Amino acid sequence: MRKYIAMVITTALAVSSCDGTKTSGKSTDNFDYTVEQFADLQILRYQVPGFDQLSLKQKELIYYLSEAALYGRDILFDQNGKYNLLIRRTLEAVYENYQGNRNSTDFTNFEIYLKRVWFANGVHHHYGMEKFIPGFSEEFFRNEINKLNKSLLPLTDGQSVEQLCDLIFPVIFDPLIMPKRVNQAAGEDVVLTSACNYYEGVTQKEAEKFYNTLKDSADTTPVSYGLNSRLVKENGEIKEKVWKIGGLYTHSLEKIVFWLKKAESVAENEAQKLVINKLIEYYQTGNLKTFDDYAILWVKDLDSRIDFVNGFTETYGDPLGMKASWESLVNFKDLEATHRTELISNNAQWFEDHSPVENRFKKEEVKGVSAKVITAAILAGDLYPATAIGINLPNSNWIRSVYGSKSVTIGNITDAYNKAAHGNGFNEEFVYSDEERELIDKYGDLTSNLHTDLHECLGHGSGKLLPGVDPDGLKAYGSTIEETRADLFGLYYIADSRLIELGLTPNEEAFKAEYYTYLMNGLMTQLVRIEPGNNIEEAHMRNRQLIARWIYEKGKTNKVVEIVQKDGKSFVVINDYQRVRQLVGELLAEVQRIKSTGDLDAARNLVETYAVKVDPVLHQEILTRYKKLNLSPYKGFINPVYETVVDRNGNITDVKVSYTEGYTEQMLRYSKKYATLPSYN
Ligand code: ZN
């Protein structure tokens, strides 16, 4: 499972403002996190702090695992659609050999299309799943293809240029052909109507029947059926084409295994060596039982500094949720940040005992969850360029309940999102005055991370239900109330002097940055994600508005929090931060009471009164102001480049990391160096 960036608002990034002036994403540490912006996308880059301090052997390990990661790139393109590799290669051939005016409208739109295909690993939007509409004409593309020397095109044996065009043009230009990568519409055959390449010639019914027959309901340790194969019908027979060495995608998997073997030779310890070895065996056999064995070894390996994901992992891209897209993430533990979550976790009992909720709702014995913070070294496959900020694996339910799972937060990616947001104009537009902006600049990133840690490590685990209370008693309001509880726990303690004693916050001012951004977001700015006329549906968004509105209303008579008008615009002003904290405590006590006693009426009342409805006038104002900032709703990352330094005898003496490669440069390099698969598979 993956966790995505939650606060899209504060991390929404801009490169160009409405008058066309460019604001750089250069931050205080002098690293330029922003690369470029096109369509609805922004490309960022991330740093790998701590890499230079790793041992040579650890650097080597990361280098080998990175190569194993990048060699899987073609697999995902093919999984996302049958013609994706063919289309990408044809586009790239035209792009690299184009002799005409590179500033012409057709070429500019052609370039944007190619960049989107790279970003989405195919011709469908990475998030919305709908097919891209090209901004260039068929004639333009056909002419340019015809101008090329045949050897530059991905023609298969005997195929003419005309045949190539006939094959891919409908897929690119006809909106009715393969319109969605994953179709979830109820009532339709989601297998036949999805463009993803996980099924060939089979209907949804046939696919479901095939797997239902394999499943044994008495099996308490079932493998993940269908995870690593394409289901096809050949000569009337339905069968799996397994992704393994000697099977489908063999050319990629051979390369991946080659680099995994090198990684195995420099493993940090025996446990890690076993993990890599088992993964190799799985790629060689395609045996899903071996995959489970690998997952168990992986989840048990907690001591290694370096860790990685490499394989067919998440099933979001299959309409039936069985077949996994290929992805890889190479990372190492961020010792300092992990220390932070451990410190919080180790003090969990103190926080529980001192919380403002009634004693009968407190846990006598509470265990904090210690989330590991990692530094990403390379992103690949379905985690590139768009990526998650947190990962929780393995996905197999029985393995999770017997052996547990690893939950990680990717620190340097979160950091890059935050840093790139500096100077994007968002805070200038929505924050009341320089005083608040300075607070946010100084403490915002720190307190936002800390609030997330408190929410995850303590908030969800705190409190208890009274005996006999149904855990699902709050019904549809349950998840909003639960998120509200966890957020309030974090907000309450972020302002506590205990955090200063523990060295987690620097002083008594810092928490104000989180209070201000939280209330601004909950009262106003999160509305940019809501279409005009709609209510708030999503649990996290409801929770934020619930807290912000409740505090605003309760503090109204004393003007604790106000929404004031300045130059015809609305702004949040906090006049009394200490009183806000008291109100946070009061609401936490009430929300915990609702949860502990299963008070459905109170839950409904709280949510319906504060969390759902939107002030249409304020909403429109926020949307208009936000639109003017020209921020991209989606973001992705390019990778750093790792290069080995080799001595006269061919031994690696160092691995250097650099951050100068551009987006197009990286994509074209990957397309050449890591080209492993034929255009058809
Ligand atoms: Zn939560």
Image (cartoon, helix red, strand yellow):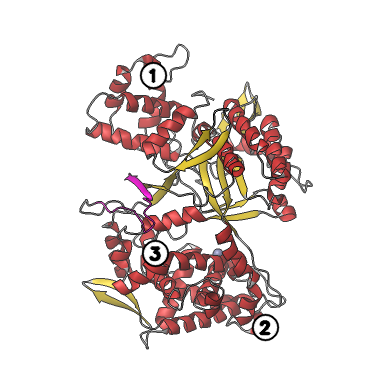
Position of residue 77 relative to residue 509, above or below, is above
Disc with the residue nearer the chain's start (1 vs 3): 1
Q: Mark 2 near ligand 1 (CB under 8 Å)?
A: no
Residue 230 horizontal side relative to residue 43, left or right: right
Pinpoint residue 76: horizontal percent, then vertical percent: 52, 35
Separation (CA) of disc 3 from disc 2 = 35 Å
The image quarter in which residue 465 lies = bottom right
The residue tagged 1 is 152
Checking the image for residue 526, the label placed there is 3
Neighbourhood count class around disc 3 (C-alpha, 10 Å): few under 14, some 14–19, many 20 upward: many
Asked if residue 524 is positioned above or below residue 384 in the image, the reply reads below
Q: Residue at x 29, y 69 (%)?
A: 617
Instruction: Report the amino acid beneath label 2.
Output: Arg
**Lower sequence index among marks 1 and 2:** 1
Quadrant including the C terminus: top right
Between residue 672 and residue 645, name the one nearer to us.
645
- Between the C-alphas of marks 1 and 2, the distance is 74 Å
Marks 1 and 3 sit apart, C-alpha to C-alpha, by 48 Å
Q: How far across and how far down the image is residue 655, in percent?
A: 52, 39
Q: Residue at x 42, y 69 (%)?
A: 443
Most frequent secondary structure within the magenta stretch? loop
Using the image, determine if residue 634 lies above or below residue 195: below
Magenta stretch in the rendered image: 22-38
Q: Which mark is residue 360?
A: 2
